[in-house]
C-alpha cells in the first residue's frame, strides 16, 4: 500500500463501512472481509448468546475477537471504544461499568455513528456517547479514560503508531488497552497487499507482531502482550475465499498498560517501609 495516501486509505475504509451499515440485516455489505456470514458468527469469536441478545441491532458481525473478554471492566470506569461502529462493544461495556461509569465510542463513519446513537437510545444508555473522529486524533481529553477497547479496527489505520500514542495520551495512569485485531504472521503477496478491498477487509494493512510491540513500547506502554490466535484462520479464510489470506494474517488479543497506576506507587505503610 506504499503508493496509497493516508487520506485515500481513510476514504476507502469509510466508504466500505458506510456501505456495510446500509446493507440488509445479516449482510456484510457489497464487499468481503472483516465480517462473518451473519452476526451470529460472533459466537465463534467468544461472545455469549446473552451478549448478542443485549444489543442485537448493534452487532454487524464485523469483529475478529472479543475485547470484552480481556478488558476486566469494573463499575464506575470510563471506557473508550476505538472504531465503535454501530456500538456493539460500547453497549456491552455500558452493561459492565453501570450507571456510575461512562462509555465513549469514536468512529469516522457518520452513518455508523447515527446507527450507534440510535442503538444507545433504544437501550436507554444515557451514559454512552458516540463521537465523530479519527482514531489517530481522538476527540477525548488527556488522562480521562480507564480502559480502551477496539475490535478489528487499528489494523485499518495508515498510522498505527499515532493511534497508540493517542491511546496512551487519553488513558489515565494505570489505564489499559484491551484490543482484538488482525496481525500479519507472514509477508503478504504483492497482489493481496495492494488490493484495496483487502485493505478495507482487515488484511492488507495488518502489521507484524514485532512491529506492533515496538509501536506500543515507543508510545510508552508497559506489560505489552500480543497473543496470536491460530484458530482464527478458519474464519479469516471466509473473508476472501481463494486468496489464501489466512496464511498471512491471524486475529490476536493485544494488551498493554500505561504506567503510573496506584499499584506502582511507592508503599510507605508500616507493612513495607
Image (tube, rainbow, N blue to C red):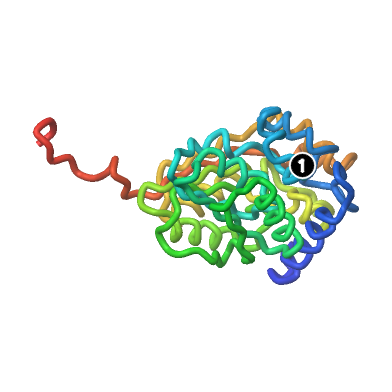
**Looking at the image, which residue is at 47% across and 50% down?**
78
Q: Is residue 79 left or right of residue 132?
A: left
Mark 1 crowdedness (10 Å alpha carbons): few <14, some 14-19, many ≥20: many
Q: Where's residue 64, x and y in %? A: 70, 40
Instruction: Provide the secondary structure element on which disc 1 rests.
Output: loop
Q: Where's residue 147, x and y in %? A: 48, 47
Quadrant location of the C terminus? top left
Q: Where's residue 49, x and y in %? A: 70, 28
Q: Above or below — where is 33 with respect to 250? A: below
* Visible residue check, residue 183: no
Q: Is residue 14 left or right of residue 90?
A: right
Q: Nearer the viewer, residue 182 or 169?
A: 169
Q: Nearer the viewer, residue 183 or 263?
A: 263
Quadrant location of the N terminus? bottom right
Q: Above or below — where is 38 with respect to 194? A: above
Q: Where's residue 161, x and y in %? A: 54, 59
Q: Nearer the viewer, residue 110 or 186?
A: 110
**Looking at the image, which residue is at 71% across and 47% down?**
187
* Visible residue check, residue 107: yes
Mark 1, residue position: 61
* Number of callouts: 1
Amino acid at each position: 500500500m506504499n503508493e496509497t495516501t493516508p487520506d485515500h486509505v481513510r476514504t476507502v475504509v469509510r466508504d466500505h463501512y458506510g456501505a456495510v451499515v446500509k446493507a440488509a440485516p445479516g449482510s456484510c455489505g457489497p464487499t468481503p472481509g472483516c465480517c462473518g456470514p451473519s452476526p451470529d458468527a460472533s459466537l465463534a469469536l467468544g461472545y455469549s448468546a446473552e451478549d448478542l441478545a443485549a444489543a442485537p441491532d448493534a452487532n454487524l458481525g464485523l469483529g475478529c475477537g472479543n475485547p470484552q473478554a480481556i478488558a476486566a471492566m469494573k463499575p464506575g470506569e470510563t471506557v473508550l471504544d476505538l472504531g465503535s461502529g454501530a456500538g456493539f462493544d460500547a453497549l456491552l461495556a455500558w452493561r459492565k461499568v453501570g450507571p456510575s461509569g461512562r462509555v465513549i465510542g469514536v468512529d469516522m463513519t457518520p452513518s455508523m455513528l447515527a446507527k450507534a446513537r440510535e442503538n444507545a437510545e433504544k437501550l436507554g444508555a444515557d451514559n454512552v456517547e458516540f463521537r465523530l473522529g479519527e482514531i489517530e486524533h481522538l476527540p477525548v481529553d488527556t488522562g480521562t479514560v480507564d480502559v480502551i477497547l477496539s475490535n478489528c479496527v487499528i489494523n485499518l489505520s495508515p498510522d498505527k503508531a499515532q493511534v497508540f500514542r493517542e491511546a496512551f495520551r487519553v488513558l489515565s495512569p494505570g489505564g489499559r488497552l484491551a484490543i482484538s485485531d488482525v496481525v500479519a504472521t507472514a509477508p503478504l503477496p504483492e497482489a493481496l497487499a495492494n488490493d484495496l478491498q483487502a485493505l478495507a477487509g482487515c488484511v492488507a494493512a495488518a502489521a507484524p507482531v514485532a512491529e506492533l510491540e515496538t509501536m506500543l513500547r515507543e508510545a510508552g506502554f508497559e506489560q505489552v502482550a500480543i497473543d496470536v490466535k491460530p484458530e482464527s484462520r478458519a474464519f479469516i479464510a471466509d473473508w476472501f475465499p481463494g486468496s489464501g489470506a489466512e496464511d498471512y494474517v491471524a486475529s490476536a488479543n493485544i494488551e498493554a498498560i500505561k504506567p503510573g497506576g496506584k499499584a506502582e506507587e511507592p508503599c510507605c505503610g508500616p507493612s513495607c517501609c
